[in-house]
Amino acid sequence: MAPRKPTAVPTTAALPHSHRLPPSSPDVLRTLSRLSRPTLISLAVEWLEEKNRDFCAPFLADDGSDIESRDELYTVAHSYEELQETYEELGARKGGKRQVIDRITEGDWRHGVSLYQLAMADTRYLLDHPTSLRWNALRLARVGTSEGASSEVDHLPRFHADTYLRNLQREVAPLAKAHYYITKLKTMPITLLRVQIHDTPYNTPQITVQHPSALTLSQNTTSETTTKSLFAAFPTGSPFIYISLATSVGQSAGSDSRSLRSLIVDAIPKALSRPQCRYVLKTTSLSARSLEALLSLRGPGRSNEAAGGWSIFAEHKGAGVGVMEHVKRPAPAQATKQSQSQQQGGHGDGANAGIGAPETRPKGLKRARQDSAISPGVESPASKRRRLVAEGRFGCSGLPDDGKGIERFDVRIEDAFPDVPEAVAAAGKPGMSGKKVSSKGTKALLDPGAASGDEHDEAAAPADANASNWTPDVRFSFQGAHVFAGIRQLVGSGVVDGEKMPGWMTGEAGVSVGAVNEGRIMVKEN
Amino acid sequence: MDETVIPDSQHDTELARIRSQIQALRTRRSLLQTTLLSSPHTLTRLNRAKATQHAPPPALTDALKTVQSHHRLLQQTSHRLAAGATAFLVQDPDPAAAGIDSGRVLGVRIEASVRGRFADPYFLLLHRPWQGSAALRVHKHTIPPCVPLPALLARWLPAPLEKDKEGAGKRQRGRRQDLGRLVREIRREVLSLHLRLAAVETLRREVGLAPSEPAAAAVMEATEEEDDAIDEEQGVEQPPRRSDAHVPAKGGIEDIKALDPSVREVEITWADGRIARMKIARDGRIEGAVVREHGEGMRGRRNRDVEKMILGGDGRVEGVVRRLLANEGGGGS
């Protein structure tokens, strides 16, 4: 038995980077087995780089030679360079990733994988799979400042990684044992913070925080605790923070873990606050998987407040041609006129459309499919027009491969229902929740009236529809890999009428959850 | 574009030559086209031709249309050249916007030109959501968050007081909206941002560093991708990534970079481990500087001499490198 330094002192310090977990612990195995083979190898090489050696020391045969004779499966290396070569050779060969994991856990890091290494591995996984987590975009807002000269000077919180970590640690320390890892991403203007909560001192009686040089954490403490990690991304130069949502794969979301999570989330703005300058986190109604999408909607650039069709202004390059086109574009103007007349003519038109819709919809669908089937190569004038309309409504957004997809978009309609006889209101089938925009548009959204008739999920009982301001509880949920690209496609194929389509369907509000009031999603000021 | 079927070098070179020729001719054509369209005589002649014929051929009307649209574009361009901010009208494509001032949106284009080059313009799109009131509100905009837009809006574009609040809000008069002033303030912010950006680039050039921002980022990305590809194929070639950093420039300065997109903090790194961080005011003044040693034995100690050099002179960010180099050459370290 290795001599263990009995430093079981209750301490509020953060878990040190070099604190090792036994290779057999589920955390280590789960983290490593998620990575692909090339990533594992490059990660191991990175661990062996000079700057990381303090925290990622491998098992080297420098003092005793007896270890070598005992274990022949993986010969103990003598130097970092030797190991680096070994891994590079391993990368050149073919093989499974199991081989590499075994080599790491049973060979070169048999004495334990440090928390720093785990954090690096987890971050690597995130970079390899940018959509593996769901992020919630939050805004940092100042508390109790009058809008004016004081906030003009520095309205953005100053973020310095070291200071910030120290403050955060001070906030969290009394309540949870955590490991912090902060890194700057190369590919995106984001500083990524990973907090791994290991324990609360109130859960387990003994917590052994050991000297960095000590070997492994005692088995019993790790086996009963499952760790939770939380990512927070700080885009540089913007008042937003993205926090990963708890419901990621493989993480149990018990009440305990939730409270630990909320603890960290609460601490994040507090750690950024200074005297006379306190911050709170406010929701921005946006959550998405892709960091690219978040960066474009809640990022440091110009596109935050110009989503959907307005993206032509954000992506504007050079000459003012795009703007001129925007002004002259005939289709939306026409659409505006139509809807204007509809509004001025009272709700009668809407009612007619509502009645007509259920019969005409399948026909319309078929027609749309037919003319796309007739001319696969050549664009018919109608489809060209639809494509142009889609271009006008969506601008440079909603392209299927721009990587800025929102995969879930929930809307609640708060507008009063247009006057419709009861028969039509009852015709809508309840229980058809959600609308997949994956490949085939299954339901037509010919106009808002038909849409709400067809797709209401949780409509309140239409007991007395005599009142003109009857407002059913209508909610839409759009789901798919890239919701707005899907809607754009539907507009292009004629399933959705691009001219009558409400603006929130283009994503111009830049939210993933919203309430539609008077045909628009109301975004809070500032 | 198309695949060359015969791997014949002669054919390849000929193809390449023809392609470049086509490219050159295209450029020339568009240049001639623009010149022809821009000429004031073209429009007058076409107009005269139209006036003389009582049934103008379609080619003539088409040509006239093209020339007229080109002249509109020219006019717009010259306005943009002369004025820092120009206005235009946009139609909100959202059918629901019809209720709001019939979907009319006022666009303001804010230009920033630094060193004879125009940056992408910034846009402010305003509408009039309050019925019976000419008060404007920002609908959409493309101003980056480092510009304190909320504060400026609160100052120069306050919302009018709501009248239906049982008369309570009527007591105090709301401040007047001043769009001109707002645009001027925003333009000042935007322009100073671009000037600071340009200043950092100048500093980099002065010490002989490669231009930073987008180019460097692109290079970074490229090497990352390359590395991944190599990892998959062979996994051997690691050194190239390391070698691109650490090119010592003048005065032992290794890197100068802005730490945030708003260029309010700039960092200078020396090859010997010294790090200077400067806080830049909006107008390019250096508000403060901290220089710390990172050599052996003096970890974290402040170097007041260098701090004085940075803050000395006219105290502006543009002259930092000149001051540092001058003192380094004169007095030594």
Image (tube, coloured by chain):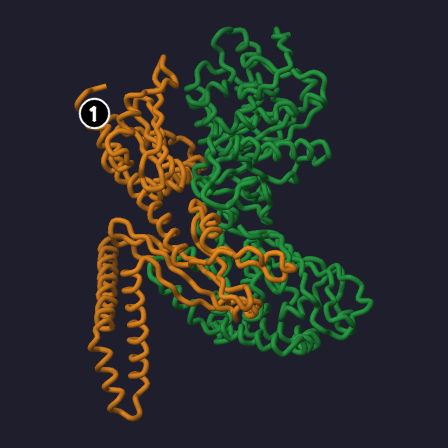
Q: Is residue A354 above or below residue A225?
A: below
| Res A126 seen here | yes
Colour applied to chain A? green
The quadrant where residue A228 appears: top right
Mark 1 is surrounded, within 10 Å at the Cα level, by few (under 14), some (14 to 19) or many (20 or more) other residues, namely: some
Quadrant in which the N terminus of chain A is drawn: top right
Q: Is residue A376 above or below residue A200?
A: below
Which chain does the residue under circle 1 lie in? B
Q: Give the residue at x 36% y 52%.
A: B187
Colour applied to chain B? orange
Residue at the outermost bottom position: B54
Locate residue B1, reporting x and y percent: 34, 58
Q: Give the residue at x 37% y 48%.
A: B189
Q: Is residue A65 above or below residue B160?
A: above
Disc 1 secondary structure class? helix
Locate residue A67, reporting x and y percent: 55, 9
Image check: A523 left or right of B245? right
Image check: A435 left or right of A314? right
- Amino acid found under the numbered disc labelled 1: Asn
Image check: B327 left or right of A24? left
Q: Which residue is mark 1?
A: B327
